[in-house]
Amino acid sequence: MKQKKIFITGISGCVGHYLFDLLANAPGVRLFLLVRSPDKICFSYKNNPRIEIINDSMQHIHKYENLLKKMEYVVHLAVSWGGRQVYKINVEKTLSLFSSLDPETCRKVIYFSTASILNENNRLLPEAGEVGTDYIKSKYHCFRQLPGLKIYDKIYTLCPTVILGGNGSHPYAHASKELKKAWKYLPLIKFIKIDGSFHFIHALDAALMVEYLLKNTFPDKIIVPGNPVLSVNECIDQLCRIAGIKRRIAFDMTGILVRCLPVLLKKRLSAWDIYSLKKRHFCCKTINLKTLGLSSNYDTLAKCLSPSNS
């Protein structure tokens, strides 16, 4: 039986670990995993003939051009979050990876970008390319160049919202780490209200969506994985309930934060931070597992943060 060849980058991250759980023992699948630091991998992969670890980084993706031409599926999770290499990795090397694929052989590419580059109608947000962080700008400029690729019609671009998740056997997502830091401030946070809203999704649900797309088609090529929009105040309410803290009187701090933070923290706030304070509502047209006819154990913030559901 012919094995489907799947090339995956970024498997050592939070979503990557959950995706590995789903694909490692899938019948008829052979995984080629580009891993910069194998020591960061929490799962067991040794002595599995269907898993090949390529100990290298996106910086040297050109070295694997011949291998990439044989790939039928590609899941590109790897990313540079900042620094001098952010544009090279997130734009130049990503486009190099996609350009190395054979349009006759490759059936699907699943590319992870970010919802920060999109507006409420899932169209490019000009401000992301103008005042975004280096990471957001790189994702914006890479997205704009995708139509020029021969493989373009095979690409599904996933633009996740806030990703949560992680436990003892899976690295914690950045947002989950930050929420854990916020626990000690809940006795103060419970007294404030802030006008704003966002979407979120658990890393396992994002991985399940990737698994679905590897097996099925979907009408949209730009996909924003996310649960229904959650207001910042609802988020605080849920955090307080989880922590067993009563929340009664809350003062609206929106105006004070918008007016004062840029003045008080002008040397620490980026142009994107200031834009975000003014925008506040980061909403898109999202899909989740329910949209795909699947069930989720992480469709609420409480479930995502519950230790018993990790």
Image (cartoon, grey):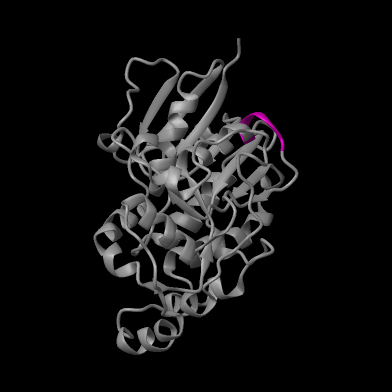
Relative to 78, 1 lies left or right: right
From the top left corner, tell me how far across and down residue 208 is, in percent.
54, 34
Residue found 48% across the figure and 74% down from its top: 276
Front in this rendered view, residue 279 or 24:
279
Q: Position of residue 233 (x, y in %)?
A: 47, 66
Q: Nearer the viewer, residue 175 or 140?
A: 175
State the quadrant of the C terminus: top left
What are the residue bounds of the magenta stretch? 213-217
- Residue 29 percent coordinates (x, y): 54, 20
Residue at x 58% of width, y 58% of height: 229
Query: How many numbered dots are placed on residues in this image?
Result: 0
**View extreme (top): residue:** 1
Q: Is residue 68 magenta?
A: no
Up the image or down, 25 lies above or below 85; here it is above
**Between 123 and 187, which is closer to the camera in this rendering?**
187
53 versus 162 height, above or below: above
**Left or right: 207 as drawn, with respect to 81:** right
Q: Main secondary structure of the magenta part?
A: helix
The N terminus is located in which quarter? top right
The x and y percentages for residue 293 are 68, 34
